[in-house]
Image: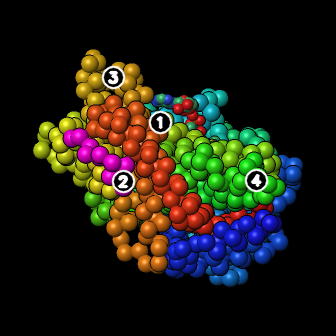
């Protein structure tokens, strides 16, 4: 049988409403229709071809990227695409490019941290791409430690200007995407100094290159930082280096939404939290979580299609060999990844809602949910990108030797995706931010302040610290309440244990340093609980379409029980479940895999196949 016949055969077996499942994945019928239309538009346009890009030299790849970016912009204008359609189009073009930073960080930073006047001045030019901006925060010496940045912005009251300067080699801006070759402007982060006093890190808009001849302006040294990991991949992006030699900018080029400097040089802090200077990172982390399910679904789609077509061993009397998807080991490696794609999809939808909610609250000067939103975006960014990066590599192995070929799509996907574990906050650094939030929550438990939202479960910690799981048979693990309580008990116990252990140190800082590994693990437990609970909430919604809900329930159980199996040590050590119950969870997991593949043939497989339009350049 030909590969296509195998796929058709698997599709034929589907027992659920495929059209409705597409809508569940997309989030709404409208989102699906937009996605489908824009995907076809990109796939049918020869300028957007991507099958040759791993073979291009850096220079040719970069030219190809510029050509695509210009063509994308032309199509967006010609077709009068909405913001949502335009962003989908860039997504399907699928090549890291300076516009990601222009639209994804430069503009959001001005919107989030600029005052009304500044927004009116800069945004129209940015929207028309008359200026192109990047986000220049990281320096050679400091990326994670934003407070450690060294670039200075010193106010000169005589001229009403800031003097931007790079005082040391390590203060050179290093990494910003779009900076190396393209950007005309940068949103830079620098230490604000007025009257000899350092007010910490703030954002400033600085013009870098002439709008006439694109040459760097006086005092600016700028360039590309060179080749990055993998062929093709992220090398389409001009990540750059930037140094300032006493560059003067007008006072109103400091973003003044959070703090202001007056004409007299007086520093004024608005009554908004200073952390709003970090707001763009929160916005992008939320976007990165939404993106994780896309990257993961691509990898899973490739590995699943391959596993259906590939046959090894098991021929009887000259008959066909066994499809590798029929091997239990293949299923136990692949299906949890498929389930994770759906889990990340749903938690991403919820995080988008949370982010919209906090934005509305901030506009009404309600800052109460900011710490939770920071913890959720940081934690989910960390957990989903780490899991996705690992999953792409696992999918490569699931495709045997063929997975190592560029034409499988997996090496390039891996090389493009893995820096997501580092940019927008190193994943470990972000987990430690979550841990900080959790320790604060535990320390306030006795104070009468009721934990709400994603930490509401901590309010039931008295129960969670002593509850015992009641599972007696494997099928008991199919009850969402049982799973939820096991995840809550594990998360609560790990956090409370860390909090207790912190008391053994002379001070909190020393304790945090010594217990960092345990704290990061407690943060992972908390974040996995969020993902599990949001999947359950999704299943409580009305989900139309024959068999769709049932399939999602199977995926939920696969997701939760595979995590339980992987982290069994944590679950058992925290005392809520016994090793025997852990073994029953594993037994149930095996049954789920079998159920997926035999009683209910290839249902999960079909769910992957319907995502295939995402794979425009891969060819199993
Ligand atoms: C269509 C859009 C799609 C766009 C996608 C584009 C993707 C393109 C690809 C790549 C682009 C990449 C860009 C970048 O990488 S930009 C650079 C990103 N850099 C980082 O992420 C740096 C990470 N470091 C930090 O965020 C911070 O330094 C820190 C949080 C680790 C520590 O900050 P510090 O000020 O030292 O804080 P403390 O730990 O002392 O905490 C103080 C206090 O503030 C709270 N807090 C920290 N961060 C935030 C925040 N973002 N929001 C709200 N609150 C925050 C923290 O919890 C503490 O609170 P407290 O305990 O109550 O005091
Ligand atoms: C592809 C790519 C694109 C990027 N784009 C941009 C951009 O557009 N604009 C921009 O400003 N920046 C950008 N960056 C920079 C990025 O944000 C930083 O690299 C990132 O924040 C990590 O900082 P770092 O490089 O200083 O890592 P480091 O902090 O040096 O990390 C090194 C190691 O130290 C560990 N570590 C650090 N601090 C701690 C701690 N407190 N506790 C425990 N462990 C710790 C980390 O876990 C890691 O293992 C980009 C980076 C990449 C790779």
Q: Which residues are magenta?
A: 467-478
- Residue 470 sits in quarter: top left
Mark 3 vs mark 4, CA separation in Å: 62 Å
Which structural element holds mark 2?
Answer: helix
Q: Quadrant of the C terminus?
A: bottom right
Chain-order first, disc 1 or disc 3: 1
Residue 220 inside the magenta-drawn segment: no
Chain-order first, disc 2 or disc 3: 2
Q: Is mark 4 within 8 Å of ligand 2?
A: no
User: Does 485 sit above or below residue 578?
Assistant: below
Q: Give how far across and how far down residue 500 sits, in percent.
A: 25, 27
Mark 1 vs mark 3, CA separation in Å: 16 Å
Chain-order first, disc 2 or disc 4: 4
Q: Where does label 3 land, which residue?
A: 511
From this viewpoint, which residue is outermost toward the bottom?
A: 79
Mark 3 surroundings within 10 Å by alpha-carbon count, few (fewer than 14), some (14 through 19), many (20 or more): some
Residue in the picture at 35% in, 63% down: 537
Q: Where does label 4 land, which residue?
A: 316
Mark 2 vs mark 3, CA separation in Å: 42 Å
- Visible residue check, residue 288: no
Q: Nearer the viewer, residue 266 or 557?
A: 557
Q: Which mark is residue 429?
A: 1
Q: Nearer the viewer, mark 3 or mark 4?
A: 4
Q: Which mark is residue 475?
A: 2
């Amino acid at each position: 049988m030909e590969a296509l016949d195998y796929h058709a055969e698997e599709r034929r077996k589907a027992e659920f409403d495929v059209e409705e499942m597409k809508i569940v994945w997309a989030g709404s019928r409208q989102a699906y229709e937009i996605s489908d239309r824009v995907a076809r538009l990109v796939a049918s346009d020869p300028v957007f071809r991507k099958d040759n890009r791993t073979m291009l030299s850096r220079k040719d790849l970069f030219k190809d990227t510029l050509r695509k970016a210009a063509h994308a912009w032309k199509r967006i204008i010609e077709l009068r695409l909405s913001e949502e359609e335009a962003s989908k189009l860039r997504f399907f073009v699928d090549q890291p490019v300076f516009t990601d930073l222009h639209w994804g960080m430069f503009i959001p930073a001005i919107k989030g941290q600029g005052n009304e006047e500044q927004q009116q001045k800069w945004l129209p030019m940015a929207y028309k791409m008359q200026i192109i901006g990047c986000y220049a925060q990281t320096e050679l010496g400091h990326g994670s430690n934003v407070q450690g940045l060294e670039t200075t912005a010193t106010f000169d009251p005589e001229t009403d200007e800031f003097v931007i300067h790079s005082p040391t080699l390590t203060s050179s801006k290093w990494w910003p995407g779009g900076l190396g070759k393209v950007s005309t402007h940068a949103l830079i982060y620098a230490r604000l100094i007025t009257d000899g006093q350092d007010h910490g890190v703030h954002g400033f808009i600085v013009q870098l290159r002439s709008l006439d001849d694109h040459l760097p302006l006086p005092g600016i040294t700028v360039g590309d930082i060179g080749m990055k990991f993998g062929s093709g991949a992220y090398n389409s992006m001009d990540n750059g280096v930037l140094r300032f030699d006493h560059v003067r900018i007008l006072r109103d080029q400091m973003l003044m939404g959070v703090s202001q400097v007056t004409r007299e040089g007086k520093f004024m802090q608005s009554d908004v939290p200073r952390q709003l200077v970090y707001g763009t990172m929160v916005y992008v982390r939320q976007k990165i979580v939404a993106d994780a399910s896309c990257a993961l679904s691509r990898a899973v789609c490739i590995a699943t299609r391959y596993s259906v077509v590939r046959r090894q061993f098991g021929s009887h009397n000259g008959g066909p060999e066994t499809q590798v998807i029929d091997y239990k080991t293949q299923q136990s490696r692949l299906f949890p990844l498929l389930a994770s794609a759906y889990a990340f999809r749903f938690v991403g939808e919820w995080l988008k809602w949370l982010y919209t909610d906090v934005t509305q609250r901030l506009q009404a000067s309600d800052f109460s949910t900011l710490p939770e939103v920071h913890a959720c975006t940081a934690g989910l960014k960390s957990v989903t990108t780490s899991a996705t990066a690992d999953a792409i590599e696992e999918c490569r192995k699931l495709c045997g030797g063929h997975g190592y070929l560029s034409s499988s799509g997996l090496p390039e996907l891996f090389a493009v995706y893995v820096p997501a574990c580092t940019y927008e906050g190193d994943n470990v650094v972000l987990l430690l931010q979550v841990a900080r939030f959790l320790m604060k929550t535990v320390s306030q438990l006795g104070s009468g302040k009721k934990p709400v939202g994603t930490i509401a479960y901590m309010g039931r910690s008295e129960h969670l610290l002593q509850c015992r799981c009641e599972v007696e048979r494997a099928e008991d693990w199919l009850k969402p309440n049982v799973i939820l309580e096991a995840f809550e008990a594990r998360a609560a116990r790990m956090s409370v244990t860390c909090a207790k252990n912190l008391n053994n140190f002379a001070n909190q800082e020393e304790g945090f340093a010594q217990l960092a590994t345990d704290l990061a693990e407690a943060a992972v437990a908390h974040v996995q609980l969020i993902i599990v609970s949001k999947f359950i909430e999704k299943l409580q919604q009305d989900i139309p379409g024959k068999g769709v809900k049932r399939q999602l329930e199977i995926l939920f159980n696969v997701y939760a029980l595979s995590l339980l199996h992987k982290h069994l040590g944590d679950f058992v050590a925290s005392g809520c479940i016994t090793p025997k119950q852990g073994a029953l969870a594993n037994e149930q997991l095996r049954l789920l895999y079998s159920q997926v593949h035999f009683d209910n043939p290839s249902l999960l497989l079909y769910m992957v196949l319907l995502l295939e339009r995402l794979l425009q350049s891969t060819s199993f």
